[in-house]
């Protein structure tokens, strides 16, 4: 029996060398490596500004604060996402207005958004999630993409791209399109810093606000305070900010991971292609629907849906895969099933039919660079065996 984890980090580049440099420098928190990481990341996604932070959740919090969301505001949030996309709305005393997603992609679509705007014309903010590594339809040839709809209605956009680096749609990189985009470098993400995140924007005013709020609302950053001729104690506090800066220890790993981002993406894409090629004829499962080119997808996840024709339930399927030594996961139990959101906003599954249908059968298969042909063959054969036996 093989043992295949759901996710596996690869640190075979310059991670140790860059970390050694940081440790030998005697300065472990935010400094040159974080600055360099920001510079190169901004370049890679084609954004004017990038701010390195200690998680994507921190980036989302800073982003939504900079966009001006405040107590009593309402913010559209897809229901098929991780809690971080919605919790940051609550941090500011605002309320999420949960939306259904498209079946097959788990993405928010321009049509779902248009319908929601008709129903809730007072909502002026949107969190959009680039689910699994595939960009939502931000732009299209008819100028009716999510960005166009938002512009038409004066809605500001926070992009949750925790899954989507590097990703693009029609040649435009995620991170260069909306008002603010937030990325995650958590341990299982497409590139990692252990814990970490990045916020990108093309808007100077938003960038300045994020930079100040990232470090206590202080008008000078740490590095500047300890390297410039001006005494380090000479600073002002202009707002009650947060403590969200990324230490150089993490940035060093991030720089090395960034260098390998395309190799990693190609490795994950090969895994996705294998699954498409070998699971295409299974009428008891629905494969993830592709709306962008294979090469524009970051392939963070490969979520299947076991449909009504499946002989086993999703939960039993996961148990049987685990018994065969194969790690899987579920993305996601929708937020309308989570006690806090369900009770606070009296949410009902029937108001989110696509998310609910997805949740009933969804299971994510292992996807990481370096999964061997032998391992992939084992995964596919195990799936076939589970489905054909009477367990
Ligand atoms: C869609 C989504 N948004 C936000 C986050 C939060 O990322 P982090 O753990 O870096 O705060 C995650 C983490 O898994 C996520 O999946």
Image (tube, helix red, strand yellow):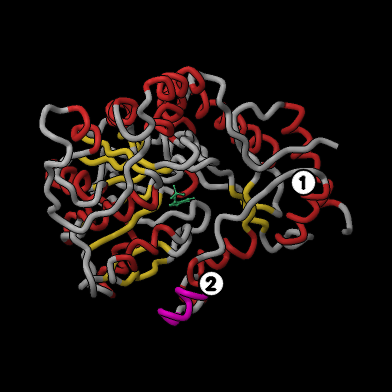
Residue position for label 2: 337
Screen quadrant of the C terminus: bottom right
Please, is residue 109 above or below residue 115 in the view? above
Secondary structure at badge 2 equals helix
State yes or no: residue 75 in magenta: no
State yes or no: residue 345 in magenta: yes
| Residue 383's disc number | 1
Residue shown at the point (57%, 61%) measured from the top left: 358
Please, is residue 40 above or below residue 321 in the view? above
Magenta part mainly helix, strand or loop?
helix
Locate residue 360 relative to residue 135 in the image: left or right.
right
Dot 2 or dot 1: first in sequence order is 2
The residue nearer to you, when weighing 239 against 75, is 239
How far across and how far down the image is residue 206, in percent? 17, 47
Find the distance from the CA under tag 2 to the CA under tag 1.
28 Å
The residue nearer to you, when weighing 18 against 84, is 18
How far across and how far down the image is residue 86, in percent? 39, 63
Residue shown at the point (48%, 17%) measured from the top left: 17
Secondary structure at badge 1 equals helix
Locate residue 98 relative to residue 140 in the image: left or right.
right
Instruction: Please identify the quarter of the rendering in which residue 203 is found.
Output: top left
Region of the chain picked out in magenta, as a range: 339-346
The residue nearer to you, when weighing 162 against 78, is 162
How far across and how far down the image is residue 112, in percent? 36, 63
């Amino acid at each position: 029996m093989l043992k295949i984890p759901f996710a596996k980090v690869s640190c075979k580049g310059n991670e140790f060398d860059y970390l050694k440099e940081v440790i030998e420098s005697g300065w472990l928190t935010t400094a040159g490596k974080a600055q360099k990481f920001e510079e190169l990341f901004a370049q890679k996604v084609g954004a004017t500004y990038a701010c390195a932070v200690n998680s994507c959740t921190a980036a989302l919090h800073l982003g939504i604060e900079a966009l001006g969301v405040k107590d009593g505001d309402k913010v559209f949030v897809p229901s098929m996402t991780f809690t971080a996309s919605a919790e940051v709305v609550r941090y500011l005393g605002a309320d999420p207005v949960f939306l259904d997603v498209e079946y097959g992609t788990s993405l928010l679509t321009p049509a779902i958004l248009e319908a929601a705007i008709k129903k809730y014309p007072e909502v002026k903010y949107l969190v959009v999630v680039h689910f699994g590594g595939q960009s939502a339809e931000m732009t299209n040839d008819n100028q009716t993409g999510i960005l166009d709809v938002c512009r038409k209605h004066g809605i500001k956009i926070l992009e949750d791209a925790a899954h989507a680096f590097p990703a693009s749609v029609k040649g435009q990189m995620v991170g260069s399109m909306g008002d603010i985009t937030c990325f995650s470098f958590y341990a299982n993400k497409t590139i990692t810093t252990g814990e970490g995140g990045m916020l990108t924007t093309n808007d100077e005013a938003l960038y300045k606000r994020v930079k100040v709020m990232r470090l206590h609302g202080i008008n000078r950053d740490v590095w500047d305070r300890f390297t410039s001729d001006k005494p380090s104690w000479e600073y002002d506090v202009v707002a009650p900010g947060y403590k969200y800066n990324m230490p150089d220890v993490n940035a060093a790993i991030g720089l090395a991971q960034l260098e390998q981002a395309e190799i990693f993406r190609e490795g994950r894409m090969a895994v996705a292609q294998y699954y498409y090629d070998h699971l295409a004829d299974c009428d008891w499962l629905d494969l993830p629907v592709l709306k962008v080119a294979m090469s524009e997808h970051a392939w963070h996840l490969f979520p299947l849906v076991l449909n009504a024709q499946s002989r086993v339930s999703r939960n039993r399927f996961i148990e049987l895969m685990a018994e065969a030594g194969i790690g899987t996961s579920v993305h996601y139990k929708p937020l309308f099933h989570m006690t806090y959101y369900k009770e606070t906003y009296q949410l009902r599954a029937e108001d989110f039919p696509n998310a609910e249908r997805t949740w009933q059968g969804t299971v994510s298969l292992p996807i990481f660079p370096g999964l061997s042909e032998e391992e992939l063959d084992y995964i596919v054969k195990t799936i076939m065996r589970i489905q054909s036996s009477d367990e």
